Amino acid sequence: MARREPQFNQQVLVDTTPMPADIPSVQEIGATSAPLTSAAFFIGDKCKAFNDDYMKCKSESNGRGEFDCLKEGRKVTRCAASVYVFLCLTRLGLEDVPGESGGIKDINTHCLKQFTAHWECLENNNHHLWECRKPEMELNKCVFDKLGLKKTIPGAPENQTPVHLRPKQIYAQFPGPQY
């Protein structure tokens, strides 16, 4: 076998094709995986209608969902950004950013400490949710008390205790009650 030198492409590929004019532009969320994982169930609760519209559009488009459903996808991104942005505003030192009024904005004032504790726990524990149940419980309680958003796991059996409410986590580093 002939020896050849490896060739590496270190360039960032950017698609410069502009979006169609009839699709409204939306700024991407720009978050890492830990804060998004921490906020995922609240984003799902708040944006359920937009997600359902997008999934319905994709299922009806016969494989062309990425093109035919751009408007619905933008609505999902805009809704998720409104939830996530208000979760992170105070951490970034910003106070006054336009967005949805009421509800979600209160996380700035009431739940930022719990949100930060939970996503930092996820970041430090390789995203193992079972290692971060205590900060998760505190975040869930704060968001429910202040905003009325409840963490529900889609497809979870109704006759069983949800995994995030069980007092003993199977894979936790320290067996026994976690909170």
Image (cartoon, rainbow, N blue to C red):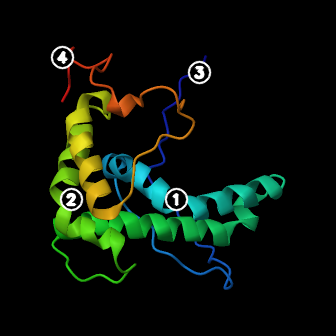
Identify the residue position indicated by label 2 in the image.
111
Q: Secondary structure at mark 1?
A: loop
Q: Secondary structure at mark 2?
A: loop
Q: Is residue 147 above or below residue 144?
A: below
Near-viewer residue (161 or 74): 161
> What's the residue type where badge 1 is placed?
Leu
Relative to 142, is 68 on the left or the right? Answer: right
> What's the residue type where badge 3 is placed?
Ala
The answer to which of marks 3 and 4 sits earlier in the sequence is 3
Q: Nearer the viewer, mark 2 or mark 3?
A: 2
* Horizontal and vertical percent position of residue 154: 54, 41
Specify few, some or many for label 4: CA neighbours under 10 Å numbering under 14, 14-19, or 20 or more: few
Identify the residue position indicated by label 3 in the image.
2
Is disc 1 in contact with disc 4, using a CB cutoff of under 8 Å? no
Mark 3 → mark 1, Cα distance in angstroms: 30 Å
Q: Nearer the viewer, mark 2 or mark 1?
A: 2
The answer to which of marks 1 and 4 sits earlier in the sequence is 1
Q: Is residue 45 above or below residue 34?
A: below
The answer to which of marks 2 and 4 sits earlier in the sequence is 2
* Horizontal and vertical percent position of residue 78: 49, 71
The answer to which of marks 3 and 1 sits earlier in the sequence is 3
Specify few, some or many for label 3: CA neighbours under 10 Å numbering under 14, 14-19, or 20 or more: few
Mark 1 → mark 4, Cα distance in angstroms: 45 Å
Mark 2 → mark 3, Cα distance in angstroms: 61 Å
> What's the residue type where badge 2 is placed?
Cys
Residue in the image at 36% along x and 60% along y: 148
Identify the residue position indicated by label 1 in the image.
13
- Label disc, if present, on residue 174 of the rendered structure: 4
